[in-house]
Image (spheres, rainbow, N blue to C red):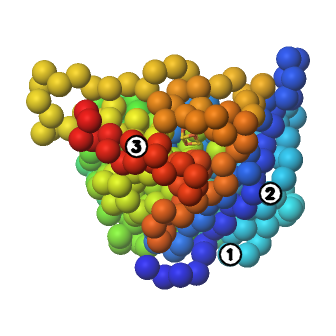
Amino acid sequence: MPEEKLLEVKNLTISFHTFAGDVSAVRNVDFDLRPGEVIAIVGESGSGKSVSTQAILGLTPIPPGEIKSGEILFKGENLLACSAKRLSEVSGSRISMIFQDPMTSLNPTMKVGNQIREILHQHARMTRGQSAERAMELMNLVGIPEPKVRLGQYPHEFSGGMRQRAMIAMAMANRPEVLIADEPTTALDVTIQSQIFRLLRELQRDFHTAIILITHDLGVVAGMADRIVVMYAGKVMEEGTTDQVYYRPHHPYTAGLLQAVPSLADDARKKLRTIEGTPPFLLHVPAGCPFAERCEYSMRICKEKEPPYFHPEAGNRVFCWLYDDGASAQRARFDAREVAQ
Ligand code: SF4
């Protein structure tokens, strides 16, 4: 894996001003992405995963949003400080995004072929003939059959899976270096879901496109991501390689998410465990660890003071007091949890 960083999100803090007060949606978030790498950002709704990534493309609605601190460096250039013109150059050609609902990106009144060609004209100077040919290539690339016919159709003539493929074709039109996929398969059935993930993986492999995959479902990222960032209540709770997060989760929240993932090996009678309680309301961020009210390993310090990041193993960081030397007894309970269950 190359060591240079393509994208770095540093100390990002975003609030939303509401009549009731400021909602702290994202707090001191850091993560990075290397060329050709796939990272998954996983968390429940309201964890800050989409808000953090929308900021990369300048999609934070300001107001009511406010970026209180941080930098987003793309190849060393701070996207939070650059002009709207520069951001639009980067976002159309170097960084693309696909959304959960393709209809939010596809124009229902315009033929799909024209929408793809429009992107090609905006960011790569192409003649009509060149863009028509490239649109066909893109349709083939994302596995849309009969591309010539499909290019002349409107989005409502496509199935949900085909619409998502068309949106991926649009996002890949300018061979971006980063593709952000925000819950790209949530609205699709399981078979189509796995086809879309396979397609994203192929694009990453063939074009060395780095991907940020945002999902609430830890179960879908195993075969896809190189690294996983787990978010909760606007903070990164844990980050590690996919193997570390799946096989040796260090944070009680990650362990709880994993227990809620069904597996084919599970006994059909075995009940999936859920994490009791609800995330804190970010209008009033609690002191200490935001997971404390739901954590069965919570200690007194957890409700008084935010933990620092600990590094239980190389390549992993965890926002949890269990890794402090003074918490060894509670830590032993956490480590023994699978034996007890
Ligand atoms: Fe649980 Fe405390 Fe760790 Fe938070 S810091 S996850 S409350 S043990």
Would residue 268 be visible to someone looking at this image? yes
Provide the residue designation for mark 3.
334
Would residue 101 be visible to someone looking at this image? no
Disc nearest the viewer among 1 and 3? 3
Provide the residue designation for mark 1.
75
Q: Residues within 10 Å of mark 1 (few under 14, many from 20)?
A: few
Q: Is mark 3 within 8 Å of ligand 1?
A: yes
- Of residues 116 and 181, which is closer to you in this image? 181
Mark 1 or mark 3: name the one nearer the start of the chain. 1
Mark 3 or mark 2: name the one nearer the start of the chain. 2
The quadrant in which residue 87 appears is bottom right
Q: Residues within 10 Å of mark 2 (few under 14, many from 20)?
A: some
Rounded to the nearest angstrom, the CA distance separating label 3 from label 2 is 34 Å
Amino acid at the residue labelled 2: Gly
Disc nearest the viewer among 3 and 2? 3
- Assign a secondary structure to mark 3: helix
- Assign a secondary structure to mark 2: strand
Position of 305 with respect to 340 (left or right) is right
Amino acid at the residue labelled 1: Lys
Position of 21 with respect to 48 (left or right) is right
Q: Residue at x 20, y 38 (%)?
A: 263
On residue 70, which mark appears?
2
- Assign a secondary structure to mark 1: loop
Q: Residue at x 70, y 44 (%)?
A: 306
Q: Image quadrant for the N terminus?
A: bottom left
- Of residues 305 and 30, which is closer to you in this image? 305
Disc nearest the viewer among 2 and 1? 2
Q: Image quadrant for the C terminus?
A: top left
